Amino acid sequence: MGCDIHPICQWKEKDMNWWRNAGIPDDSRSYSFFAQLSGQRTGTRELLLPPLAPCRFETEYFDDNSFDLELLTGDHSASWCSLPEMQAYLENPLLYEYARGVWERWVQYGEFIAQYHEVPFDHIRFVWNFDS
């Protein structure tokens, strides 16, 4: 039992307005990563940085192009972020140390997808939600 993340990495062609699913980045159960990424499962952790993307589907515009949240098998706290946002956050020395390993793997995965499809980094995003 516990909380799991259900992520999808997506990419967008340079001339297109829709996103394509690229695959699943590291979906390890890391509560430190969940806390730093979206404010989930913070427990007693005192985060030195605010979470990167807490529940953005509810608070920020999402150019979803009919993104189907049913693709995500979790049941709460859907959100998203871009690869450049994750890259910038990774550079901050205040990133919670126990989150850093999974964070680096997501960034590496996104960079690989960008290189493979020959698109700029801002054409890569991660979408996720959680189960309880």
Image (spheres, rainbow, N blue to C red):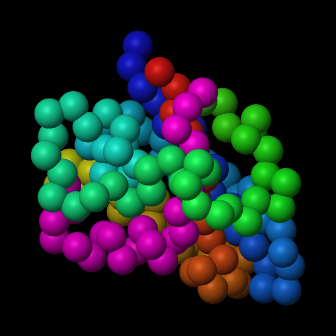
In x, y percent, where is residue 61? 65, 64
Total number of numbered discs in the rendering: 0
Apparent side of residue 81 relative to residue 29 in the rendered image (left or right) = right
Work out whether 55 lies above or below 93: above
Residue at image x 57%, y 80%?
Answer: 121
Quarter-of-image position of residue 28: top left
Q: Is residue 102 visible?
A: no
Direction front: furthest residue: 59
Work out whether 34 lies above or below 90: above
Residue 84 lies within the magenta run:
yes
Work out whether 27 lies above or below 121: above
Residue at image x 55%, y 31%?
Answer: 76
Quarter-of-image position of residue 22: bottom right
Quarter-of-image position of residue 50: bottom left
Residue at image x 51%, y 71%?
Answer: 83
In x, y percent, where is residue 8? 63, 50
Residue 117 lies within the magenta run:
no
In x, y percent, where is residue 116? 67, 75
Of the pair 23 and 122, the residue shown nearer to us: 122
Bounds of the magenta segment: 75-96
Of the pair 48 and 110, the residue shown nearer to us: 48
Apparent side of residue 101 relative to residue 69 in the rendered image (left or right) = left
